[in-house]
Image (cartoon, rainbow, N blue to C red):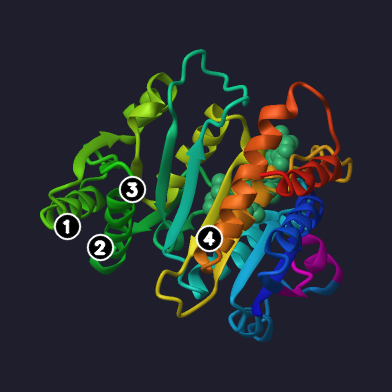
Amino acid sequence: TRTIDLAVILGDGIGPEVVAEALKVLHAAVDGEAVVRETRYPLGAGHYLATGEILSEDTLAALGQHEAILLGAVGGDPRDPRLAGGIIERGLLLRLRFALDHHVNLRPTRILPGVASPLANPGEVDFVVVREGTEGPYVGNGGSIRVGTPHEIANETSVNTAYGVERVVRFAFAQAVARRGRLTLVHKTNVLVNAGALWQRTVDRVAAEFPQVAVDYLHVDAATIFLVTDPARFDVIVTDNLFGDILTDLAAAISGGIGLAASGNLNPSGAFPSMFEPVHGSAPDIAGQQKADPTAAILSVALLLEQTGLASAAARIERAVAADLAARGGARRTTAEVGDAIVAALGTV
Ligand code: NAD
Ligand code: IPM
Ligand code: MN
């Protein structure tokens, strides 16, 4: 039988709670078709405070040997001075995305039947955001001078390379071809003229190879309008790392909440393992109370299976989630109850 050699990073806050449910669903969904071999890596803010390790070279090398990585969420108490400066987010999460060359951050959005959207008439919403994952302001170029003085200057430089932009744009076009043939570039070319010109020129050039794809452009501010007023217009959105981060929390909010939003940090070449995680964070406000919705983590497992060639198991999870969402109503359930209900639904879809 097929074996999936999976690395699991539980992380912090609600991370362990949602991953527990995602793993239940994963094992049940592949039963008979594949075996999941789990290796757990105790990483996150809690692990750092206990051991001093954020992500050692050895751990990074070990993670790189797996077929795929499942991550809950990382990040501790924002007021803890020992965690200031996003050392966990940058030193662990972004370090993994960069070191494993996760240049495509794929974030699908659908409004599934039965799900309450805050929008009155959202229409048929089904789009993916293809967020660049290894460049932009996330690179960490920049710095501050005269810190703490009235003359402080703080710079964050957005890095955009022809190589990096082209590869993610090509991935987005391939998605558009496989979907409804529409691609929207989102940027801020009226202000961020250097990066904007590179993105626009790259999209224009690649578009010539895909005459079947209808291409348009929106400034990021206008994109937030349309995500609320007419989200059904979107099919594939391609954008940079920071705009993609912001737009995908908004996309989650319009489609039933952050507890439903899945993501894959993909290395499409397969040179390094891809990493699957819910879009949400460690949610310290509800951690440890079994209040978190594990659906986002469960749908991230579906993405994982789709990307590792187990498409029918992936589709089964999606159908089970859809069935559970349709039946959910207003009832309050614990994190584990949602996971159990989705496992049960696997047997019926
Ligand atoms: P967050 O996503 O953790 O929480 C935002 C809001 O959404 C909170 O009210 C939270 O309770 C709610 N929420 C999140 N996930 C939910 C779920 N599954 N079910 C129900 N409600 C849910 O964002 P934040 O508060 O900005 O960040 C908290 C910490 O997480 C920070 O340290 C941040 O850096 C980190 N973070 C990590 C990741 C990641 O690991 N991929 C992503 C985002 C934020
Ligand atoms: C996300 C998160 C991360 C990001 C943070 C925690 C670094 O918000 O995965 O969306 O900005 O990419
Ligand atoms: Mn985010």
Circles 4, 3 touching at the beta carbon (< 8 Å):
no
Residue 242, position as x, y percentages in the image: 44, 48
Mark 2 CB within 8 Å of ligand 2: no
Q: How far apart, in angstroms, are the residues tagged by discs 4 and 3?
A: 24 Å
Of callouts 1 and 4, which one flags the residue occurring earlier in the amino acid sequence? 1
Disc 4 residue type (three-letter):
Ala
Q: Classify residue 295 as left or right of residue 172.
A: right
SS label for mark 3? strand
Q: Which image quarter holds the N terminus?
A: bottom right
Name the residue that disc number 4 marks.
311
Is residue 157 or residue 237 the one in the foreground? 237
Q: Position of residue 196 (x, y in %)?
A: 23, 48
111 in relation to 104, above or below: above
User: How much space separates mark 4 and mark 2, taking CA atoms?
Assistant: 27 Å
Question: Local crowd at mark 1 within 10 Å, few (<14), some, or many (≥20)?
Answer: some
Q: Is mark 2 on a helix, strand or loop?
A: helix
Secondary structure at badge 4 equals: helix
Say whether disc 2 or disc 3 marks the residue closer to the N-terminus: 2
- Secondary structure beneath dot 1 equals helix
Nearer the camera: disc 1 or disc 4: 4
Give the amino acid at mark 1: Val
Above or below, 127 against 168 in this view is: above
- Residue 238, which numbered label? 3
At 53% from the left and 57% from the top, the residue drawn is 264
Q: How far apart are marks 2 and 3 (CA)?
A: 11 Å
Residue at image point 79% right, 73% down: 52
Badge 4, how many Cα within 10 Å: few under 14, some, many 20+? some
The image's mark for residue 166 is: 2
